Image (tube, grey):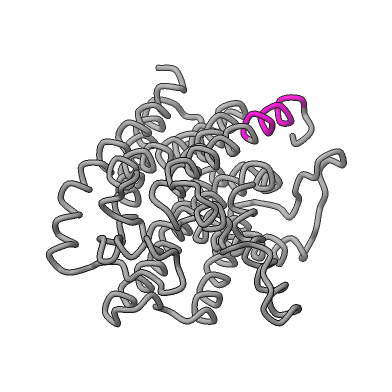
Amino acid sequence: MTTGIWSFEAALISFIISSLIGSKLIPFLVKVKCGQTIKEIGPSWHKNKQNTPTMGGIMFIFGSLTAIAVSCVCYMMATEDFMYNKLKIAQVVAGYAMAFIYGAIGFVDDFISIRKKRNLGLTPKQKLVLQFVTAFLYLFVLRIFGDDTSTVIPFVGLVNLGFFYYIISAVVIVGIVNAVNLTDGIDGLNGSVTMFVAAFFMVMAGVTGFQGMNIYCAAIAGGCLGFLVWNFNPAKIFMGDTGSLFLGGAVCAMAFGLDLPILLLPLGIIYLCEMFSVILQVSYFKATHGKRIFKMTPIHHHFEMSGWNEVKIVIVFSSVTFVMGILTMLLFLFGVVK
């Protein structure tokens, strides 16, 4: 069986399970009144989405978990490659564990929001503390299993950052996790963008021969697609912080698992634009005592307030991710980021 079959199997299993869970999860969440509370400061037409079930990230969390477990076990039974490489196993297992913990943090946040019937769960300080602890634990586990403090810098090569590697890496992980979270604001956006990000990481994992991470990425991509069956406009369910924080952790696990966190810059361009649009808006607002750069942030809301419908935003943002993915692949194949 060729290596591509294992990743196809993982993507298919994750897609099927994620989409099937949706058929049961949505009516259950409606029954127990786990509906999303829409922010007052958001676009007025978003009020129509009030009480749409949230915490839909449960679908691809368990869909991808099942797919990774089944496909990795089958692969290890068929070949000795990966089975005896402790670091590679740790990169996959710890990578999923990190994403799962971030998803659990999001679940608690969603649960508190639902119980209090407001769009506010954990405080920002509580979230940051939990997120940094999770990031450091992930990096610590990888270190135990033999990971080093080197990283690739384009046009420079492999650079050993020493102790600073852990500080920089933790900041990057928490930053990307929250950037992915900010991307979840309109129907189908986060799932679509992350599906393409995972697909490109899957290809690069295949090129490097890291089959375990190849399976991991395929499962995340398949799970996102399964979720989009129910989340594409008009959404029947939202992923909530449960899903968006999980996906943020999963994206970081892909990048760090391949020892190429630098790829988060081009592949995660949409995430970064979302995050920096908020930072710029808040900073400019405070500096000018009330003036704004954008009509509303994160930036997908700016385009929405400018007249773009949600489907158009999803298509354009996903297309940008796809183009940046092709560019990243070219840089990768020509050795710029090897």
Asked if residue 28 can be seen in this view, the reply is yes
Q: Residue extending furthest right?
A: 156
Left/right of residue 188 with respect to residue 328 in the rendered view: left
- Nearest the viewer among 44 and 324 is 44
- Nearest the viewer among 261 and 82 is 261
Up the image or down, 159 lies above or below 9; here it is below
| Residue that appears at 58% across and 39% down | 321
| Residue that appears at 40% across and 30% down | 75
Q: Which residues are magenta?
A: 325-334
- Nearest the viewer among 191 and 17 is 191
Q: Quadrant of the N terminus?
A: top left
Our reading of the magenta stretch's main secondary structure is: helix
Image coords of residue 234 (percent x, y): 30, 47
Up the image or down, 291 lies above or below 202; here it is below
Q: Residue extending furthest top?
A: 1
Q: Quadrant of the C terminus?
A: top right
Left/right of residue 76 with respect to residue 66 in the rendered view: right
The answer to which image quadrant residue 143 occupies is: bottom right
Image coords of residue 11 (percent x, y): 37, 33
Image coords of residue 60 (percent x, y): 34, 48
Left/right of residue 229 with respect to residue 317 in the rendered view: left
Asked if residue 249 can be seen in this view, the reply is no
Residue 215 included in the magenta stretch of the image: no
Q: What number of labels is visible? A: 0
Q: Residue extending furthest front?
A: 307
Image coords of residue 254 (percent x, y): 55, 45
- Nearest the viewer among 105 and 2 is 105
Residue 332 included in the magenta stretch of the image: yes
